[in-house]
């Protein structure tokens, strides 16, 4: 297997913890993999991807990292932090209207010194992103475009090796459940399962994307990531498990599903989820447990993908009941 360039700034391996009180409450066998503790600026799943992406940017001699996302993007926050740490300039193209007071992830983006370009209309995002890239080039810069959510084949490698890490810790899980959106985490885990022989099943709970789009996108990403390792693994739709049953409300729209999940994790385990990603994924997992989707003997690993700073975002505040 080839060894693509990688930086080592994540705090690895992240711990696995048994969720004993939640397990008892729900009559299930629940564990959590703490990728909210990857160490970079409050952690999260983008850290593992950025180990490969920032290394690629360095290899290309880049001086500026450019990326895009929602106003409260966890990916943009971690990209800005990695840029600061490795001496890159950072430009972030964020969708929405600039708030009077930055909070949560946006506050952190600014603290890390990122320059922010606002796009009101989401349909203009690609054009503005391209513009930022070309302006940087024209002014003599060497920009590197970090893809949405860090989900290129290069970024996905972070989760291929995360699966290897899991196997060294405990290979006995029957299910891995996690929040999926731009597909890099999903693709990396899917490739890792094949390469490192994980026997359990991997189910992504979609945050905002259609199930069929995810299956097709994730399988392509996994095949392309395999090529970066000099392997020839090929993936098709049937190699990817995903459900879009829990995202009908739309991206970042909180419902009882997310609110209940965030509060259950907090009250039973003293553990924080975020309202947008992990709250929705955990809510979906709880619904599957209640419907009897898992066997009572199944060991279920909830892979925590981070995002906890957005608990403090004004736009996601909610009433605790
Ligand atoms: C980005 C993100 C995800 C989704 O990961 P993808 O690799 O983009 O599918 C899940 N959870 C959190 C907290 C995230 O920030």
Image (cartoon, rainbow, N blue to C red):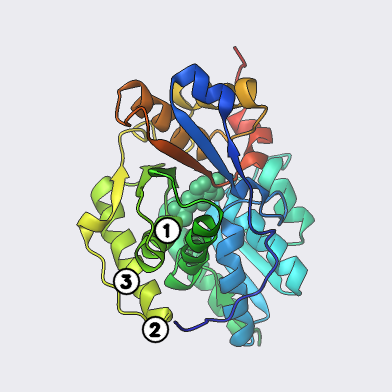
> Picture coordinates of residue 279 (x, y %)?
51, 33
Q: Earlier in the sequence, mark 3 or mark 1?
A: 1
> Picture coordinates of residue 215 (x, y %)?
27, 55
Which label number is shown at residue 108?
none
Q: Which of the two discs, 3 and 1, sits closer to the camera?
A: 1
> Picture coordinates of residue 86 (x, y %)?
74, 73
Picture quarter with the C terminus: top right
**Residue farthest top in this picture:** 321
Name above or below for residue 73 compared with residue 32: below
Q: Which of the two discs, 3 and 2, sits closer to the camera?
A: 2
Quarter of the image for residue 83 reads bottom right
Residue at the disc numbered 3: 223
Instruction: Name which residue lies at 46% across and 65% down.
Output: 160
Residue at the disc numbered 2: 230
Q: Is residue 208 visible?
A: no
Q: Earlier in the sequence, mark 2 or mark 1?
A: 1
Instruction: Name which residue lies at 38% across and 43% down.
Output: 174
Front one among 43 and 93:
43
Residue at the disc numbered 1: 189
Could you say whether the residue bearing mark 2 is in a helix, strand or loop? loop
User: Callout 2: 10 Å neighbours few (<14), some, many (20+)?
Assistant: few
User: Callout 1: 10 Å neighbours few (<14), some, many (20+)?
Assistant: many
**Circle 2/circle 1 CB separation < 8 Å:** no
């Amino acid at each position: 297997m080839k060894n693509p360039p990688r930086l080592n700034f994540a705090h690895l391996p992240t711990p696995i913890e048994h969720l004993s009180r939640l397990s008892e409450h729900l009559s299930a066998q629940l564990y959590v993999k703490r990728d909210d503790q990857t160490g970079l600026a409050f952690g999260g799943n983008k850290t593992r991807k950025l180990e490969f992406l920032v290394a690629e940017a360095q290899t290309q001699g880049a001086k500026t990292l450019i990326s895009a996302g929602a106003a409260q993007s966890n990916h943009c926050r971690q990209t800005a932090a990695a840029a600061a740490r490795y001496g890159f300039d950072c430009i972030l193209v964020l969708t929405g209207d600039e708030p009077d007071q930055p909070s949560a992830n946006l506050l952190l983006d600014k603290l890390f010194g990122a320059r922010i370009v606002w796009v009101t209309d989401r349909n203009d995002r690609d054009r503005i992103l391209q513009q930022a890239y070309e302006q940087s080039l024209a002014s003599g810069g060497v920009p590197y475009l970090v893809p949405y959510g860090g989900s290129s084949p290069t970024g996905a490698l972070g989760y291929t090796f995360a699966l290897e890490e899991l196997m060294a810790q405990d290979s006995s899980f029957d299910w891995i459940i996690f929040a999926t959106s731009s597909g890099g985490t999903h693709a990396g885990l899917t490739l890792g399962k094949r390469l490192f022989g994980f026997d359990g099943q991997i189910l992504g709970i979609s945050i905002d994307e259609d199930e069929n789009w995810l299956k097709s996108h994730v399988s392509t990403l996994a095949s392309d990531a395999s090529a970066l390792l000099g392997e020839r693994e090929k993936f098709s739709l049937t190699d990817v498990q995903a459900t879009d049953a829990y995202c009908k409300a739309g991206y970042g729209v909180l419902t009882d599903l997310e609110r209940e999940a965030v509060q259950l994790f907090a009250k039973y385990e003293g553990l924080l989820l975020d309202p947008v990603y992990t709250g929705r994924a955990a809510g979906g997992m709880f619904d599957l447990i209640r419907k009897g989707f898992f066997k009572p003997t199944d060991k279920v690993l909830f892979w925590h993908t981070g995002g906890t700073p957005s608990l403090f975002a004004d736009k996601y505040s909610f009433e605790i009941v």
